Image (cartoon, grey):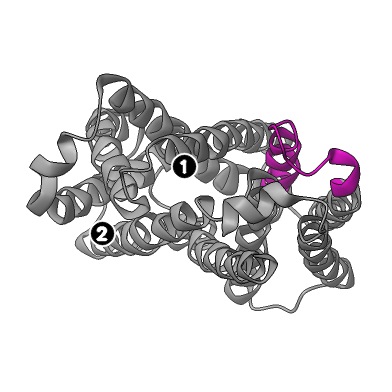
Amino acid sequence: MIGAATGSTIVGVAFGMAAGALWGLVFLAPELVPAFSPVQLAAGRYFVYGLISAALIAPHWHTLRGDLKGNDWFTLGWLALAGNTLYYTLLTNAVQLGGIAMTSLVIGFLPVAVTIAGSRVAGAVSLRRLLPSLLLCTTGAICIGVQALAAPSNGTSGQQLIGLLCAIGALISWTIFAIGNQAALARLDNVSAYDWNLLTGVVTGMQSLVLIPAAVFFGSIAHDATAWGQFAGVSIGIAVLASIIGNAFWNRMSRILPLTLVGQMILFETLFALIYGFVWERRLPTHLEIVAFVLVVFSVLACLGAHRTPRQPTIASQTA
């Protein structure tokens, strides 16, 4: 049983790493098409996400629809809002106004928020055993923050403040999503993680229809054909890689790992976002950023160690 649990944990961590690698791309998207507003980026990405999800789910829609009740659709609605529409709008605002480094710092505290929430679940690893991992994660995030504050900024102090508030809002929104999404996956064991992602995509696509008028009103549409082509390419790429494939990896992981370990998997999004940022800025990481990387890795390892203790039989039952 312990061996099976360990094997399942490794698979779950691999899914979490894959999701983080793909999700990290969303931090780069606003830099690729800076002429477009955050609302336009969100509308484009999620409209494509909805279209692809509807096409993929259509062949078995009638069978799947019978497995869902009215409150399940309500759950899909607020999960789509908290984890996709609202979160991504706030995130892109934060990146454009505050920069990738500052946004990565704030989002880097997601593991702390989700892990603390997960420690309150019955049978979870105690917060005391998770404390070393949380301290390592927090220290790593602070290192990134110090680096971000020291870096020159092109925006005004007011823009930086608004960007910070947007990043905090994104942090709160996605924390709520992570907790609620795992609870829904645990409750709806008759719906696969893949189908749940597609259902979320359909609902998110419907929400994007509300964003389109706002995108036209608040963002300029006076772009040439090349700019619109780049926008379409980024929207399709992020929709497929981050939303369709990345979310599928995340949902699969959420059914394998406990919430206290799920929180640590979000660190991979931060790591890959920083790596993509270094590539985009054509620079090597600073000493502080290297220290942050090392601390994040040890944070994940410490969290894995806390969950592998023989005194936690509930973890084995969840991952067997």
Residue 127 percent location from the top left of the image:
85, 39
- Decide which of 301, 316 is in the foreground and name it: 316
Few, some or many residues within 10 Å of mark 2 (<14, 14–19, 20+): some
Identity, as a three-letter code, of the amino acid under mark 1: Tyr
Question: From this viewpoint, is residue 129 visible?
Answer: yes
Give the vertical position of 164 relative to 25 (above or below).
above
Tell me the residue at 91%/42% (across/down).
Answer: 128
In the image, taking residue 38 as reference, residue 131 lies left or right, namely right
- Decide which of 169, 16 is in the foreground and name it: 16
- Decide which of 259, 207 is in the foreground and name it: 259
Question: From this viewpoint, is residue 154 visible?
Answer: no
Tell me the residue at 87%/57% (across/down).
Answer: 143
Q: Which residues are magenta?
A: 106-130
Magenta segment's dominant SS is helix
Specify the quadrant that holds the N terminus. Answer: bottom right
Residue that label 2 marks: 232
Identity, as a three-letter code, of the amino acid under mark 2: Ala
Residue that label 1 marks: 88
